[in-house]
Amino acid sequence: MERRIVHIVDNSQTSTANHLKNVKFMEKEYNKVDFAEFSHVYLNILKAASRGDGNNPNTRNTIEFLGQFVGYITTVQHQAHKNDFEPYLLKFLIYEVTKMQKGCLPQQVKKNICIFWSSTLRNIGDDVTMENLLGQTIQNNLLEAVQDIKPLVRHQAVLALARLQTPSNRECPVINAFISCLHDSNSMVRREAVRWIAPNIKSIEKLSEKVRDNDPRVRSTAFSRLADIGIKYFKIVQRQHILRSGFAETNPIVKKMFLERLLPSWLSNFNGSYLGVLKSIKLDGEENDISNTEDLSTKIMEVFFKTEPINDLIDALPLDDTKVIPEDLIQNELIHYWNIVVKYLRQSEDLEEYLDKVIPDLTIFCNYISRVAHNTLSKNLEEWEYLNIQFILCHLFDMAEKYDLSDEVGRKTLEELIKTLLSKHRLQSRLLNKLVAIGSKLEPNVDSFAFEGNLIISNIWQPLVDKPPDEDTEREKAFKVSELKVKQIMLESELEAAIEAEEFLKAQDLTNKLQEIKRILEKLLSDNLEVQQIRVTADDSDTLCWCLDILAAILGHANMKKLPSCLITTRQEFLMPLIQHNNPEIHWRVFKCLAIYSAFDRQLAQEYLKALCNPICFYRYKHDLNKSMLIDSISIVTDLIRDSEMNLFSTEADICYVTNNTKRRLYNEDANELNSLANTNLTIDSILSVFMDMMDDDNDDIRHTVITALAKLILSGIPIDFTVITRLILKWFTPVTQGALQQIIGVIVNLYVTRVENAREVVARAIVPIINKFCEAPRSSLLVDIDMVNVIKFLSAITDVGSKNSSVDVHIQVADLLVQEISSRPSELSTIYFAKMLKYLHINHSNDVAVKELVTNCELLLEKTILEKGTRQEVQKFAARLGADASICTNGNTESLQLTENSTIRTSVSCDSNQTHTQNRMLLQQSSPLSVVIEESNSTKSADQNSCTDTENIPPIKRKKLTNMNVERFSLRSSAIRSRKNQQAGPTLCKTSQTITSKSRSFSSGSSSDVIPTSQRNLRSNRFQAKVDNKIICKELRVLLDKQKLNGVNGIKTNNLEVSNSDLSISQSVSSSSDSTVNLRRSQRNARDSVVTRVNGTKSIVNAVSVQVKRKKLRGRTLPSNDATNSLVVNEFDTSDQTLHTIIEPSECQMGILADYSQVDTRRSSRRIQALRSDSTSDESPSRTVPKKRAKKNTKT
């Protein structure tokens, strides 16, 4: 049985094609043998397979087959015994595998177990129900695996958990685990989580966000998954977010998945109804929502135009016989769809024949628009309904704008329709701008167009009305009517009396009079007085806002290059009297018109400049500013700054702060305080500072306007301060910055460094503040989570000039700046990132002088032992790279170095390089504690370059690398060798000093050096000579001390401890650069004579020094020898409360470092001094070395 089972499993590991057949064979073996025997064999096979390599396909096939068999057997048992179903094998495996998972398992075992559970659960039938305990056990094990540190284990655990989700449970732990996996650091885990997560209220929202994942495979899987789920499960906001992300996709594979998979799937959810898709993404709460929805609908229909038949698209329009949509069917989505179809047919040359089927003639179409406007705008509508109707009219006029205007009748009809709408209805800004644009096409002449618009404004603001009749005239008329009526009554009485008296002639005469009176009376009653029409000025807010909207639309027309005289008159008579109006709705519209007028008139802009800048100035202090006024202020100020001819803004004073160093006034929140803010000088820097604050505003329109303004100002070459770039880059790295705003900032920075001259220098100055800001951020700040390596890589990339021909190497300046910052603040947290950034800089070695000085500064910096290990290593790597690159350049351009006796090599350097290095040295002195050391080192180096050398005594092994700093290291060592040779004739220090002086050397480091004036060169040479003589004195003393060591004198006498700092104070006097050369030589001669006399006469002092040096050498810790160490430093030790100081002059670098380092730790300083003493002793000749046995004897003594 065991062999048969093993054979079946062995056949299943090669391919998955025969798994189903082998499952049948395994089922037969399961039914034949006892369960205990079968389970034992099965478990052994499973354990063996789980320990195999998970990357091996045979192992994976085996584990999947074992899981498939368990799922199949469980399903078969459930179908056979539904009532008393008992999955024995599954229970057994759950128990055993759970025991296997306890403890620390290798990654492959965990992964294979997850593969087994994934295969088992995947092959269990849909109608199979397990006990809660069994499912909970598997679930707990897999949930633990989801949190594993290995991504391969998490990946397989996600696959296994797919069948254990419960979408109906809002708090399902498996779905919560999937949601956490959506944000996993591994893209493979995120991808599988997107693919297998079950849709519910919580997961749908998280799933829609993965279309913005940084991995294209995850985004592609997200679009595929969203297509399978369907559009009806998402909110309108989520639908728009998904569609916008798809249209903004740049990866071709993801874009193809969106266009060919998601959009057709969502269209099929509405049974192929295009209008259904457009309605499903409709947002009409605000004007911006409607505009965004229309833009998105246009992009969707453009895709369908390429994939769907044109006849189906046209048939979706419910047109009547006149080729228009009936008025009772008018909807915003339908009219918009009609407009999109018409635009597409007009743009396609092959489809013009279909155009006549969807639109009528211009005259009929204008009459149709007139009816729609009259029937809708005359009603009492809600605000959203009124807004919706105006968008419908905007689409209709958009279709009318593209008509052929050669038809004179249609042209006149359209012009009258526009004038009627402008005169009778107050329209929304979008429709108003559309009508003005069409009117400018109908009237190309700007003056005539402006006159017609001015006439419309005049008729609205001052309409013609009938003059009411005068009261006296009305009274006189009424009196005449009354008089005639009285006469009529009297004549009628007389007429009746004449008729009764049969006086017919009299009756005839009275009848004629009565008819005449009736005729006059009727004329008076029927005739009205002559009506006079006069213009009445309207002062209500609705009328004034209506007129101001039309005026702003006319002024903002693109063809308006110069103000016509009629608009100037309108400004003086209509606009200026409204400046002081109290109504806020009128006030911001007046401000907008005034801003547009200022763009045409420099004198007007200068007069009202502070008023135009007031919203910007008050932004930080008032929170109830009108948003429209603020947006207009940003736009006009940006245009005025960019206009170089106006030159209205300064660059020196501050806009929002006025300081008085002698007096101050207490703050009082009133109007005068705020008004005083605008009475200061206006500067570009202060305006940009306020613009940066506006980028954090809650209003989307303000943020969009201000980022557009910043882009215009920065990319137009306006001089800006590095603080603006600093805040932009920090804003770009901030996680809370919105995606669209973050993308715009990235584009601005990229274009700034590539298009604007000297932009990289500005960014270079912002590097240090940016890194400091990240390092100084508190723990609660979101900047703490930013990867600093990405930050320094980004900063080095945007400041790299690359292969461009640039007169300034920005990275050299950045390197100098970073070295200065490291030197000035070695213990700060940002120092390590300054050092790390050095390795990402691309240094151009064409400027040898700058590179050499940079190497020198790095070497001086490395001498500061207080640098942390990481910082020191990074600086060492940078210095080594610079040195290697410089040596390659030097060997490629120059011949081998030649040193001859009494020869001087001088290399001239341009004045610009000299001035640049002088400025760099001054900056380093101001910021670095090594300024004194650097200056002294430069002085010593310049003096060495003007001296001579004898290269005969230089060891051959050193001759190959006698370049750069190595020459300086050999200078004093050659002097010491010659001094030892000259000592054989006697300890005549003066003679030795003269010999060394006469054989001074000159060397060339393979690079250019500064041109030093003659007087300064002589002074430095004298100082250097004094230092060399002093070193010779100290070395002669050391020679005599070593001779006494060989004689074996062990006695210690402390009576004459006069060989101290007073005898060798020449080292301090020589180090002072303010002493004159005469004083130096006099003090040198006196000290030399004193030391020689005391050494020859007092043997005990020598013996004491010898013994103490040996003891200290044996007790102290000896550091490795350093070639740069040319002399000893102060070595201090105590014996029986008596101190003996032996001072031998150190180099300037060592003195400066020890001076700084001693302030940190005195004990470490003593050990460092002792180590330097040991290193210096090791550099001497072998004859001076004390034998080991002798040293042990002295140590015992």
Image: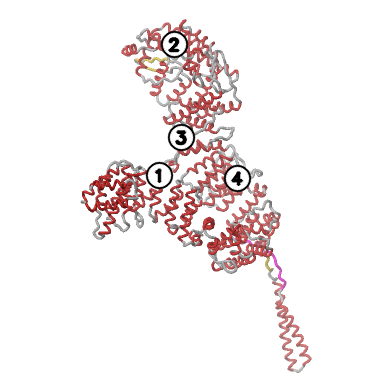
- Of the numbered discs 3 and 2, the one sitting upstream in the chain is 3
The disc, 2 or 4, on the residue closer to the chain's N-terminal end is: 4
Tell me the crowding category of disc 1: few under 14, some 14 to 19, or many 20 or more residues within 10 angstroms, Cα based: some
When the figure is inspected, residue 180 is found, relative to residue 168, above or below; the finding is above
Which is more foreground, mark 3 or mark 4? 3
Q: Residues within 10 Å of mark 3 (few under 14, many from 20)?
A: many
Q: Amino acid at mark 1?
A: Asn
Query: Which residue carries the number 3 mark?
Result: 833
Q: Nearer the viewer, mark 3 or mark 1?
A: 1
Residue position for label 2: 1037
Alpha carbon distance from label 1 to label 4: 57 Å
Separation of residues labelled 3 and 4 (CA atoms): 44 Å
Give how far across and how far down residue 644 sits, in percent: 65, 43
Q: Earlier in the sequence, mark 2 or mark 1?
A: 1
Q: Nearer the viewer, mark 2 or mark 1?
A: 1
- For mark 4, does the 10 Å Cα neighbourhood hold few (<14), some (14 to 19), or many (20 or more) residues? some
Asked if the residue at tag 4 contacts the one at tag 1, i.e. Cβ–Cβ closer than 8 Å, the answer is: no
Give whichever of discs 1 and 4 has the lower sequence position.
Answer: 1
Magenta-span inclusion, residue 537: yes
Name the secondary structure under disc 3: helix
Camera-near label (1 vs 4) is: 1
Position of residue 1040 relative to residue 188, above or below, is above
Amino acid type indicated by mark 3: Tyr
Highlighted range, magenta: 529-541
Whether pointer 2 and pointer 1 mark residues with C-beta atoms closer than 8 Å, the reply is no
Amino acid type, label 4: Asn
